Amino acid sequence: MKKLLTAAIALSVLASAGAASAQSYGYPRDRDDRSAEQRYDRYDRYDQRDARDDRRDDRRDVREDRRDSRYDRRDDRYERRAERRYDGGRYYHPRGYQVRDWRRGERLPAAYRGRAYAVDYRTYRLAAPPRGYEYRRVGNDVVLTAIATGIITSVLFGMFY
């Protein structure tokens, strides 16, 4: 009786192993049945590297989209083109300084903090600066700076011609 039971168990194990090896597990076996999206190496193993690369590309795209939207938001609010252009007269930059583009967060040198570079916001229809801030002309641009530190908080490009 023990021999018969042992033989039945062994036969069932062998039969299940044979059935399991006959399953395709969703992988096509012949070369004509493969789709263009699924890639296999020469040993008929599914190559998942492409799927990983696709996920990485998707993540990279999302990061770039966030970066772009953050830059656009900053551009619209703090660094923008002037709506009107004015004749501000001849401009002389301070001795030892050259024309350059200023950005938000940079420190305006003390040479630009003199009376010659002050801009009256009422004359040029600008919004009143907050307490502790003032407008300064730098080339053809106008920057809003903190009086105490000279840190630029906003830039209007092309205000003067």
Image (tube, helix red, strand yellow):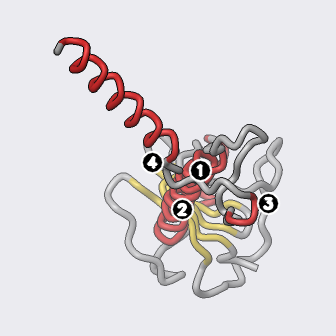
Q: Position of residue 81 (x, y in %)?
A: 62, 76
Q: Amino acid at mark 2?
A: Asp
Q: Distance between the Cα atoms at labels 4 and 1? A: 55 Å
Q: Residues within 10 Å of mark 1 (few under 14, many from 20)?
A: few
Q: Write down the quadrant of residue 17 in the picture.
A: top left
Q: Distance between the Cα atoms at labels 2 and 1? A: 21 Å
> Which numbered dot is residue 92?
3
- Quarter of the image with the N terminus is top left
Q: Nearer the N terminus, badge 4 or badge 3?
A: 3
Per the image, label 4 sits on a secondary structure element best described as: loop
Residue reaching furthest top?
2
Q: Position of residue 130 (x, y in %)?
A: 34, 61
Mark 3 vs mark 2, foreground winner is 2
Q: Nearer the N terminus, badge 2 or badge 1?
A: 1
Q: Nearer the N terminus, badge 4 or badge 1?
A: 1
| Mark 2 in CB contact with mark 4 (< 8 angstroms) | no
Mark 2 vs mark 1, foreground winner is 1
Give the residue displayed 44% in from the left and 40% down from the top.
Answer: 20
> Which numbered dot is residue 65?
2
Per the image, label 2 sits on a secondary structure element best described as: helix
Along the line of sight, the residue nearer the viewer: 142 or 19 = 19
Give the residue displayed 73% in from the left and 38% down from the top.
Answer: 43
Mark 4 vs mark 1, foreground winner is 1
Reading the image, the residue beneath label 4 is 147
Mark 1 vs mark 3, foreground winner is 1
Give the residue displayed 31% in from the left and 20% down from the top.
Answer: 7
Q: Residues within 10 Å of mark 3 (few under 14, many from 20)?
A: few
Reading the image, the residue beneath label 1 is 51
